[in-house]
Image (tube, rainbow, N blue to C red):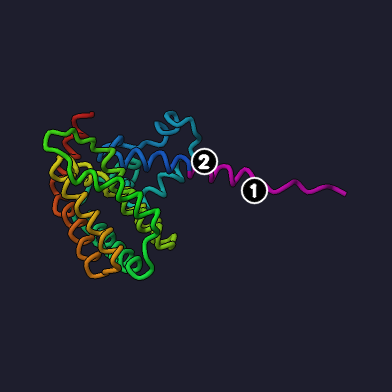
Amino acid sequence: MAVAAPLALPESKSVNDLGQQILGKLRERILNWHYPPGHHLGEQALCDELSASRIPVREALRALAEQGLVDKVPNQGCYVKQPDAEATHHLYDMRLALELFVVERLAQTGLPAAVEAELRACWEPLMHIRAHDRVEGTVLVAADEHFHLSLARAVENPFIFEALQDINDRLRFVRLAVITTPHRVQTTAGEHVMILDALAKKNAEAARRYVRQNINQARNKVEIAIARALTVAHKRR
């Protein structure tokens, strides 16, 4: 009796896993402007650059197009999408809605003491930053993202956390353009501490007010952030 050949499930899975790895790399490079807007993402060039075959690269490009990060041009391939102010504002609408829910829920359930202590230890000292102090933009942006994602994680809803994580990735370039001066750092620190104070008092209305104030400070700079990011991207070319 002949023995049937085994199904090729492991191979299919490995291709899919590799596609996910490539997707992660390309997404990170696009969101960090390593590939600037308008950059051509040719399949063969990416295969050579990433030492990969065409199938996982093609899967990754298809996923990037579905995520709205690249434009597929017939007979030409994929190009990194140009930043769009309207789409960025839509992301801020979604971020604001989710974060307002997060603080309202935490005002009811309470923020874990360990999380509050960690966030206070980071941001309270920054309320007293001096005008001539050096500002490390990438470090502060990471700390700002950590603050908001820590609150989201405390709600214990993985879908909200993952959605906010994706939005944070897409809006990072705005934060990098906004958190650049000691004055803005001091303002951001104060807003963060006020959010923590409101949550400690279980004052949902105050927490929502400070979250809205904090998010809108960056949202109001979207157009400036896009212009600055494009200027930096063109200088890298």
Q: Residue at x 58, y 42 (%)?
A: 14
Q: Quadrant of the C terminus?
A: top left
Name the image quarter holding residue 48: top left
Name the residue at 38% across, 61% down.
160
SS type, badge 1: helix
What main secondary structure does the magenta stretch of the protein show? helix
- In the image, what residue type sits under mark 2? Leu
Residue that label 1 marks: 9
- Foreground residue, 207 or 170? 207
- x, y percent for residue 79: 30, 41
Which residue type does callout 1 highlight? Leu
Residue 63 is situated, as x and y percent measured from the top left of the image, at 41, 49
Q: Is residue 236 above or below residue 63?
A: above
Q: Which residues are magenta?
A: 1-20
Label 2 belongs to which residue? Answer: 18
Q: Residue at x 14, y 49 (%)?
A: 223
